[in-house]
Amino acid sequence: MTNGRESEKRRSSPRRDDAAEERVSAPEAMRSAIEQLTQLLGRAPESVSALKPTDEGWEAQVEVLELERVPQTTSVMAAYRVALDPAGKLLAYERGRRYTRAQVDRGR
């Protein structure tokens, strides 16, 4: 049997696994990044090229069609870095490089 103070203390102290319980899964983070970036940019991203957990939540690299051209290989793409909190809410985004769809990254 415990007294009221001990049970109150347990309720008010954060549990170590709270952060793990609050963090969305990787697929949920990817969907969240796409949905929220679509709302902000008015364009649907074409793909998520990278996703990684961070201390603050999630960080994703999202590829977006910025300017559609004919032929499609000349269309302009942009890579956006997206920061999400552990629950999948967008905290920040930043457009990185712009490139044509046909452009291939070269090894560094």
Image (spheres, rainbow, N blue to C red):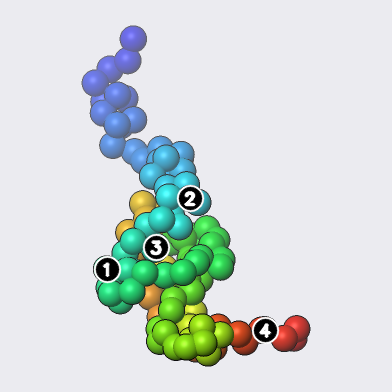
User: Disc 1 vs disc 2: Cβ atoms closer than 8 Å?
Assistant: no
N-term-proximal mark, 3 vs 4: 3
| Residue at 51% from the left image edge and 83% from the top image edge | 72
Q: Nearer the viewer, residue 48 or 11?
A: 48
77 left or right of 105 in image: left
Q: Which sits earlier in the primary sequence, circle 1 or circle 3?
A: 3
Query: Which of the pair 87/35 is nearer the observer?
Result: 35
Q: Which residue, given by chain and number where applicable, does mark 4 sit on?
A: 105
Element type at mark 1? helix
Q: Are marks 3 and 4 in contact (CB under 8 Å)?
A: no
Kindly report the distance in space between the C-alpha atoms of the residues bearing marks 4 and 1: 28 Å
Q: Secondary structure at mark 3?
A: helix
- Specify the amino acid type for callout 1: Gln
The residue where tag 1 is placed is: 39
Q: Earlier in the sequence, mark 3 or mark 2?
A: 2
Secondary element under disc 2, as helix, strand or loop, is helix
* Mark identifier at residue 27: 2
Residues under labels 3 and 2: Cα distance?
A: 10 Å
Residue 48 percent coordinates (x, y): 51, 65
Q: Amino acid at mark 2?
A: Pro
Q: Which mark is residue 33?
A: 3
- In x, y percent, where is residue 20? 46, 43
Q: CA distance from mark 1 to mark 3?
A: 10 Å
Looking at the rendered structure, the kind of residue marked 3 is Ala
